[in-house]
Image (cartoon, rainbow, N blue to C red):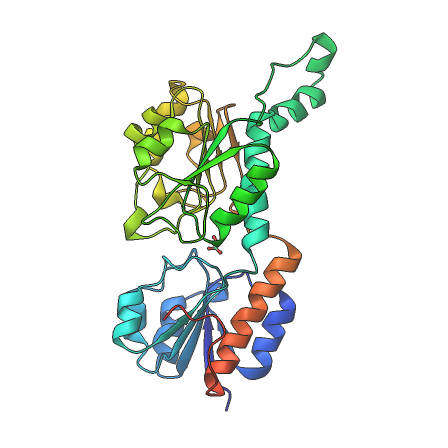
């Protein structure tokens, strides 16, 4: 009998899903009309979870599955998983680092360029025929500006090298100065915001960064500064951001992530000093395939008694 695998959300591509189905009895929870009833019925069988960042793997779910052994997350971030509860039970957790670094950094730069060169506005300007009546407002050059990067992990570093290529100066913030990184370190987030033209959030989500960017950080960023968030919506106090944008206390924001996805605050949707994306940092055919491969390989390694490829715990 194949081991039962609970798949939490619809992100794994068909090829990798077929591979999973070859080796596991796959329960597609998001397709079930009554997920609670399915969990109740299959709780003894389920030995593995393939999780997605937008569905919680809570302590109560973990506690409800007495034979759960591994959670294989289809994302680099794993703030949706109760790691303490998993650790207590000796349940292994894996994620999908590295394979999505470049694509996610590209999205940060896309937002940065779109904001500073008014790409979305420009596109609309042409489509609605405004160009016929004159030129659109000017944008801002990147060269010589400061990118303040919050979180100098793999994705932060990939953003920094791209920003450097565009002539930006890099300053970064995080829990500690990173060995072997020559960019200027600024431990204080407010001071980082003060010196930044672009404050780029590339830190993990979760308790340590929860609502770290609120009105005081936005005030420090100032009326010429742009906020870019490709990490998690939970890092920003969304109401404070809306107020800062409305009152032009910051110049604009580029957002790939939101506090209550897929819901985006109505007020933000109406603003023209923002660029809004539907959480697409890793959303390319190539990267989603590689992420799926890591999910499959971690699960197979675990059940073959081999070392995990990308363990979190
Ligand atoms: C997506 O947000 C991820 O963490 O991979």
The quadrant of the image that shows the C terminus is bottom left
**Position in image of residue 273 (x %, y %):** 50, 24
Drawn side of residue 192 relative to residue 296, left or right: left
Residue 250, compared with residue 257, is above or below; it is above
| Residue pictured at 31% horizontal, 66% vertical | 83
**Position in image of residue 21 (x %, y %):** 58, 78
Q: Which residue is most to the bottom?
A: 1
Q: Which residue is most to the right?
A: 132
Residue 57 in sight in this render: yes
Residue 280 in sight in this render: no
Residue 256, compared with residue 16, is above or below; it is above
Residue 160, compared with residue 205, is above or below; it is above
| Residue pictured at 45% horizontal, 29% vertical | 268
**Position in image of residue 96 (x %, y %):** 50, 64
| Residue pictured at 29% horizontal, 74% vertical | 64
Residue 148, compared with residue 260, is above or below; it is above
Q: Nearer the viewer, residue 304 or 187?
A: 187
């Amino acid at each position: 009998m194949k081991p039962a695998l609970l798949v939490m959300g619809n992100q794994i591509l068909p090829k990798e899903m077929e591979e999973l189905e070859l080796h596991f009895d796959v329960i597609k929870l998001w397709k079930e009309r009554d997920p609670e009833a399915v969990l109740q019925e299959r709780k003894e069988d389920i030995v593995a979870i393939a999780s997605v960042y937008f569905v919680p793997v809570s302590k109560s779910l973990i506690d409800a599955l007495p034979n759960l052994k591994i959670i294989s997350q289809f994302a680099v971030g794993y703030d949706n998983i109760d790691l303490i509860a998993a650790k207590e039970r000796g349940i292994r957790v894996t994620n999908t680092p590295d394979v999505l670094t470049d694509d996610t950094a590209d999205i940060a730069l896309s937002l940065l360029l779109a904001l500073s060169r008014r790409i979305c506005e420009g596109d609309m300007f042409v489509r609605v025929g405004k160009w016929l009546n004159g030129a659109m407002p000017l944008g801002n050059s990147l060269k010589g500006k400061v990118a303040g990067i919050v979180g100098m992990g793999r994705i932060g570093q990939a953003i920094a090298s791209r920003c450097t290529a565009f002539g930006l100066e890099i300053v970064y913030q995080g829990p500690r100065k990173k060995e072997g990184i020559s960019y200027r370190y600024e431990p204080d987030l407010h001071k980082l915001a003060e010196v930044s033209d672009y404050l780029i959030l590339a830190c993990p989500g979760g308790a340590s960064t929860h609502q770290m960017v609120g009105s005081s950080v936005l005030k420090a960023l100032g009326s010429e500064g742009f906020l870019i968030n490709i990490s998690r919506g939970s890092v920003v106090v969304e109401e404070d951001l809306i107020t800062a944008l409305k009152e032009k206390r910051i110049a604009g924001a580029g957002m790939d992530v939101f506090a209550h996805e897929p819901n985006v605050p109505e007020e933000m949707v109406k603003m023209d000093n923002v660029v809004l994306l539907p959480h697409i940092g890793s959303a390319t055919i190539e990267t989603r395939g590689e992420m799926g491969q890591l999910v499959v390989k971690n699960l197979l390694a675990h059940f073959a008694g081999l070392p995990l490829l990308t363990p979190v715990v």
